Image (spheres, rainbow, N blue to C red):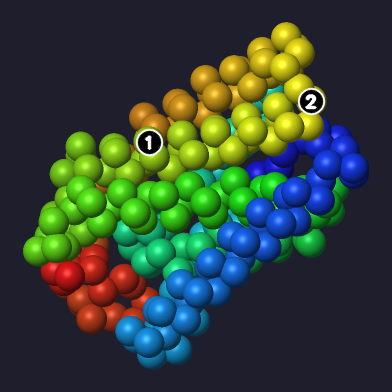
């Protein structure tokens, strides 16, 4: 994923360093909480899986430049449900960094913007999950409506942040607004796919009873809170 280079010039990009640092600090806090709940091996394993999946999403799934950024199928809600909030956040941050280091060095100056854009919607998704999923409901029993709400929250958050960076960097010129609109319209098409992907993954997990209690998946996947 990348926000187009030059969208925010060097005089303004310092804001992204602050927001990116804040998002990474909160990710570290989540990792600390996860370590208190489960062993370090579990967090490490889930984070490695998440990072590899994110890099694969970026590099191998279809992605096309539209307007002010690229449209990706990131599957943030799938990562959250399968692996948990902290591993999903770590995977998004590490996968994004790996993409910049090994495949798209031109993206590295925008890392603060991109990591903010991916992580903050994930935090919002997790907050929503606590509200709409009953404590006695394991994730494998979620409905389409619930997964749709999670997906819309995540994808709308990405679109909102990309729009913010575009307006912050380029202002309210007609061309910029049109580019933001084109990106937003294209990106929300992901909402059609992601809930179905979530349900497919959850259905597969439900049949794989051997994963219950495994350190490589989120405990809540099979167990009530």
Residue positioned most to the left: 136
Q: Nearer the viewer, residue 85 or 213?
A: 85
Q: Is residue 158 left or right of residue 19?
A: left
Q: Residue at x 67, y 16 (%)?
A: 177
What residue is at 45 percent from the left and 52 percent from the top? 122
Q: Is residue 49 visible?
A: no
Q: Which of the two discs, 1 and 2, labels the residue nearer the N terminus? A: 1
Dot 2 falls on a residue whose secondary structure is helix
Q: Residues within 10 Å of mark 1 (few under 14, many from 20)?
A: some
| Residue 155 location (% of width, % of height) | 46, 38
In the shown orientation, is residue 94 left or right of residue 149?
right
Check residue 152 in the rendering and tell me which mark sits there, or answer none.
1
Q: Is residue 69 above or below residue 182?
A: below
Residue 133, compared with residue 222, is above or below; it is above
- Crowding near the residue tagged with mark 2, few <14, some 14–19, many ≥20 C-alpha atoms within 10 Å: some
Say above or below: 197 vs 126: above
Q: Outermost residue toward the right?
A: 10
The C terminus, quarter of image? bottom left
Along the line of sight, which residue is nearer the eye, 125 or 83? 125
**Residue 216 drawn at (x, y percent):** 37, 77
User: What is the secondary structure assignment of the residue under circle 1?
Assistant: helix
Could you say where residue 20 lies in the image, as x and y percent from the top left?
Answer: 67, 57
The residue lying toward the viewer, choosing from 159 and 173, is: 173
Residue at image location 71% in from the left, 42% down from the top:
2
Q: Which residue is mark 2?
A: 170
């Amino acid at each position: 994923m990348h926000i187009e280079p030059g969208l925010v010039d060097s005089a303004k990009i310092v804001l992204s360093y602050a927001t990116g640092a804040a998002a990474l600090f909160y990710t570290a806090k989540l990792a600390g909480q996860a370590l208190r709940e489960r062993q370090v091996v579990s967090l490490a394993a889930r984070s490695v899986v998440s990072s590899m999946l994110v890099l694969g999403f970026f590099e191998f799934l279809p992605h096309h430049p539209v307007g002010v950024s690229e449209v990706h199928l990131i599957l943030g809600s799938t990562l959250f449900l399968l692996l948990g909030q902290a591993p999903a956040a770590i995977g998004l941050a590490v996968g994004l960094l790996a993409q910049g280091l090994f495949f798209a060095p031109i993206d590295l100056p925008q890392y603060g913007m991109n990591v903010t854009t991916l992580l903050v919607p994930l935090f919002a998704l997790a907050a929503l999950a606590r509200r709409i999923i009953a404590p006695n409901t394991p994730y494998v029993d979620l409905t389409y409506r619930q997964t749709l709400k999670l997906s819309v929250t995540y994808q709308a958050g990405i679109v909102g942040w990309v729009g913010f960076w575009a307006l912050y960097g380029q202002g309210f010129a007609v061309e910029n607004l049109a580019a933001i609109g084109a990106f937003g319209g294209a990106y929300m098409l992901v909402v059609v796919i992601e809930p179905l992907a979530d349900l497919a993954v959850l259905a597969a997990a439900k049949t794989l009873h051997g994963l219950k209690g495994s350190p490589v998946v989120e405990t809540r996947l099979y167990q009530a809170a």
